[in-house]
């Protein structure tokens, strides 16, 4: 609604709907510019799930059909980033706020938006850690990663901006893949609750491998696409000395190890429940897209140039200093990253370990229940599966923190109460009174619209 | 990337392993004296590792094996990235963020393998280890961020060289004293030493992630532990003590830092996991921010110096 209003307003000002022409012809006063910027950015923030507009994302994901969640997370939500790009880069927000206070060389309103991004990272991470529904967990991780993307886009500089756009791509692919694997598990077992599953790796090894690679990318660990983008964002933040934003970025990236590991440990690893004993691997038509997207994640992680060359074009278009690449290596003034080299060295290390493993005596395969249990006799696999309250000691630290959702519920309750009061005060049983209010309302609106 | 690079990288990993394991042996003796014991021979750790490697062992499935290989592979690769006194197996890969995230590959592999064993103790241990990581890593990273901002480079080798060129008082230990203290506390967490060792807590959760391992798996994890210790201590030496002009100088600094960490560990009790988180997010984080703001706003220690 707000964006639509802003678009119509811009049409009235410039007489065209073509984005390029609108912003090229635009010559507005300071306050009009600010209002249009706010109208635009608010819808962008809501779409990408930035605090305090993030509450819809987990709710939507929790109840969305399994087939739709990957599209919602990988495609639709990321559209918010485009709106943010329009309002910050194309609309030249830095010029609009050129006279505002500066914080670390960034106009205060833009810094405030980055701060919201930082809060989203922290809240998304903390909430993701304590979810029991795998899809809600991934939805909160989208909230956190939306924060990274927003911060990257808002910086409009050489390094972080490229990182933000690359992260947009990397996270879209990785989270869509993760949703696909959860959908595959739900297809076979009928649940997405982490605590009801376990040991899926013994029945769905390919799904497991796909999930593993997608979370490696989501957590920003090499050699996947998410690492390159996170590296760019962290280097960019460090080069600008944005300590508080960088703190959130570090928190989110270490915290992401915690939340992505939970489904890995409790859904795919651990004990296999007897009721899941005769499950099969996901159907072939599910495996093909999952595998393809995994290959994209890996491919971009090893050869980031494939995507970065388009980002460089965007930077050229927007008149930003471009990220420089020599060969396969990203060269920026405070560091260099040759993803292919990192991948090769990792492969070499893996080879050393593999040779060592194969040279040593053979192992004997034993069952999952054949474990050390501190002299207890346990014969029920479910009892030996650690899935409930995985991070209980950590969750206890913030279980009493206020929730945004409750705040919204309270506000909506108050709004309803005001409505009842208006209803009580102004409305009566007589139709004539009601008609009078309606006529008055129309009169005020039409008179007001004429001005 | 030539064959020579890979060859020297391989030798470097071997040397790092031999060096850290010997120092570990000496430290076991030092801690023993601290606790009025005689302690084992200095090469006892080597014997333990080779004995474990030569034994046959059990396996709980392919991820149990694969995780161990991935863990050791990831950590061995990270060792290759570490610059030591002008030696670099591969040029231009010693970026601090690359090192800390490649290190995470190894950690993930180990966590995966441990959870794959199906033992709840292992999962509890991994959960604690990750929580612990969230605690110590963030204040350390904030300090590192300040350092990158100050010296305009994220390369560990270059950061060490800058300090080398400034002489002894150019070390960040003196130029960023608050940050150095934070990092030494964080090192204690990284090494999993007391008071931050609740994730292995032998008497409480049966050694946590390590509970199921035996034979060659355990041997490989011993090697992994020594290599990751090498990475973490080397990082601190490079970032705060100016690395070393020669290998010997580096080794001496390394020995001092590692022994200090062990001494603190030898006389400390153990934090509960939530206490560790609260601890790190109180003073070390605050101090890290103070240090970074001093660097950003006043330039003390970077542009301004006595």
Image (spheres, coloured by chain):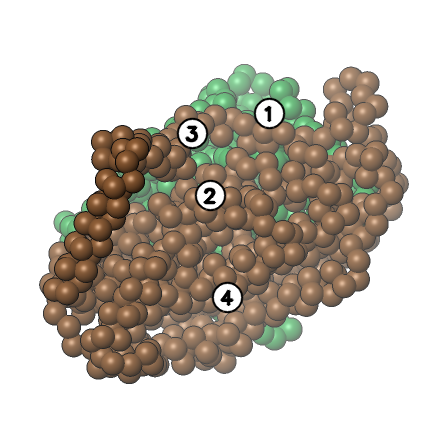
Chain colours: A brown, B green
x and y percent of residue B55 in the render?
83, 39
Cα distance between the residues tagged 1 and 3: 24 Å
Would you name the residue on which mark 3 appears?
A398
Q: Secondary structure at mark 3?
A: helix
The chain containing the residue under callout 3 comes to A
The chain containing the residue under callout 2 comes to A
Cα distance between the residues tagged 3 and 4: 32 Å
Would you name the residue on which mark 2 appears?
A125
Whether marks 4 and 1 lie on the same chain: no
Would you name the residue on which mark 1 appears?
B201
Foreground: B33 or B208?
Answer: B208
Q: Residues within 10 Å of mark 1 (few under 14, many from 20)?
A: some
Q: Residues within 10 Å of mark 4 (few under 14, many from 20)?
A: many
The chain containing the residue under callout 1 comes to B
A209 w.r.t. A62: above or below: below
Among the 4 quarters of the image, the one containing residue A106: bottom left
Q: Residue at x 22, y 75 (%)?
A: A12
Whether marks 3 and 4 lie on the same chain: yes
In the shown orientation, is residue A131 left or right of residue A269?
Answer: left
Cα distance between the residues tagged 4 and 2: 20 Å
In the shown orientation, is residue A8 left or right of residue B300?
Answer: right
């Amino acid at each position: 609604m707000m964006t639509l209003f802003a678009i119509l307003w811009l049409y009235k000002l410039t007489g065209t709907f073509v984005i390029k022409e609108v912003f090229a012809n635009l010559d507005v006063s300071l306050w009009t510019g600010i209002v249009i910027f706010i109208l635009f950015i608010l819808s962008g923030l809501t779409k990408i799930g930035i605090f305090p507009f993030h509450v819809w994302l987990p709710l939507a994901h929790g109840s969305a059909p399994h087939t739709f969640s990957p599209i919602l997370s990988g495609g639709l939500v990321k559209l918010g980033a485009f709106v943010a790009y329009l309002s910050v880069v194309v609309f030249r927000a830095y010029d609009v706020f050129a006279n505002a206070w500066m914080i670390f060389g960034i106009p205060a309103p833009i810094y405030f938006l980055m701060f919201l991004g930082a809060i989203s990272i922290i809240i998304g991470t903390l909430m993701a850690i304590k979810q029991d529904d795998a899809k809600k967990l991934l939805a909160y991780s989208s909230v956190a990663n939306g924060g990274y993307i927003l911060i990257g886009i808002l910086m409009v500089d050489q390094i972080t901006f490229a990182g933000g756009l690359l992260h947009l791509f990397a996270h879209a692919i990785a989270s869509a893949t993760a949703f696909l694997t959860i959908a595959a598990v739900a297809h076979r077992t009928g649940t997405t609750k982490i605590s009801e599953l376990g040991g899926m790796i013994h029945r769905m090894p390919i799904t497991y491998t796909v999930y593993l690679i997608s979370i490696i990318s989501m957590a920003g660990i090499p050699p996947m696409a998410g690492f390159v983008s996170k590296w760019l964002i962290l280097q960019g933040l460090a080069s600008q000395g944005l300590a508080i934003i960088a703190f959130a970025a570090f928190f989110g990236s270490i915290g992401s190890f915690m939340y992505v590991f939970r489904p890995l440990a409790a859904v795919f690893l651990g004990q296999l429940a007897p009721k899941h004993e005769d499950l099969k691997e996901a159907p072939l038509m599910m495996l093909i897209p999952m595998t393809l997207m995994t290959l994209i994640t890996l491919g971009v992680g090893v050869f980031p140039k494939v995507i970065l060359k388009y980002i460089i074009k965007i930077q050229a278009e927007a008149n930003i200093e471009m990220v420089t690449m020599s060969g396969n290596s990203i060269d920026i003034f405070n560091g260099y990253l040759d993803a292919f080299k990192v991948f090769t060295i990792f492969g070499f290390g893996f080879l050393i370990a593999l040779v060592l493993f194969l040279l040593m005596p053979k192992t004997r395969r034993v069952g999952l229940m054949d474990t050390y249990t501190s002299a207890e006799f346990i014969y029920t696999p479910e009892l030996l599966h650690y899935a409930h309250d995985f991070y209980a000691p950590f969750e206890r630290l913030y279980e009493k923190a206020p929730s945004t959702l409750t705040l919204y519920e309270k506000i909506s309750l108050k709004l309803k109460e005001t409505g009842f009061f208006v209803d009580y005060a102004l409305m009566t049983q007589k139709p004539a009174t009601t008609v009078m209010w309606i006529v008055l309302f129309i009169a005020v609106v039409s008179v007001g619209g004429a001005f | 990337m030539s064959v020579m690079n890979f060859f020297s990288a391989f030798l470097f990993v071997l040397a790092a392993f031999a060096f850290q394991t010997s120092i570990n042996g000496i430290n076991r003796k030092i801690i023993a004296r601290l606790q009025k014991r005689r302690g084992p021979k200095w090469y006892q750790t080597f014997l333990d590792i080779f004995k474990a490697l030569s034994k046959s062992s059990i396996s709980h499935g392919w991820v149990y094996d694969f995780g161990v290989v991935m863990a050791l592979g990831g950590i061995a690769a990270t060792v290759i990235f570490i610059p030591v006194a002008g030696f670099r197996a591969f040029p231009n890969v010693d970026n601090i963020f690359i090192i800390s995230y490649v290190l995470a590959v190894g950690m993930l592999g180990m966590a995966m393998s441990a959870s794959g064993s199906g033992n709840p103790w292992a999962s509890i241990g991994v959960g604690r280890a990750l929580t612990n990581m969230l605690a110590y890593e963030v204040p350390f990273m904030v300090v590192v961020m300040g350092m990158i901002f100050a010296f305009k480079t994220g390369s560990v080798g270059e950061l060490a060289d800058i300090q080398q060129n400034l002489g002894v008082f150019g070390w960040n230990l003196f130029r960023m004293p608050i940050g150095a203290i934070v990092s030494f506390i964080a090192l204690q967490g990284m090494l999993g030493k007391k008071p931050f060792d609740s994730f292995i807590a032998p008497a409480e959760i049966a050694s946590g992630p390590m509970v199921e391992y035996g034979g060659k798996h355990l041997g490989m994890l011993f090697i992994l532990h020594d290599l990751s210790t090498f990475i973490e201590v080397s990082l601190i030496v490079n970032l705060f003590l100016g690395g070393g002009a020669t290998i010997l100088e580096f080794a001496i600094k390394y020995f001092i830092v590692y022994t200090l960490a062990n001494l603190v560990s030898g006389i400390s009790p153990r934090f509960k996991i939530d206490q560790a988180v609260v601890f790190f997010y109180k003073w070390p984080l605050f101090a890290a921010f103070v240090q970074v703001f001093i660097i950003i706003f006043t330039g003390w220690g970077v542009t301004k110096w006595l």
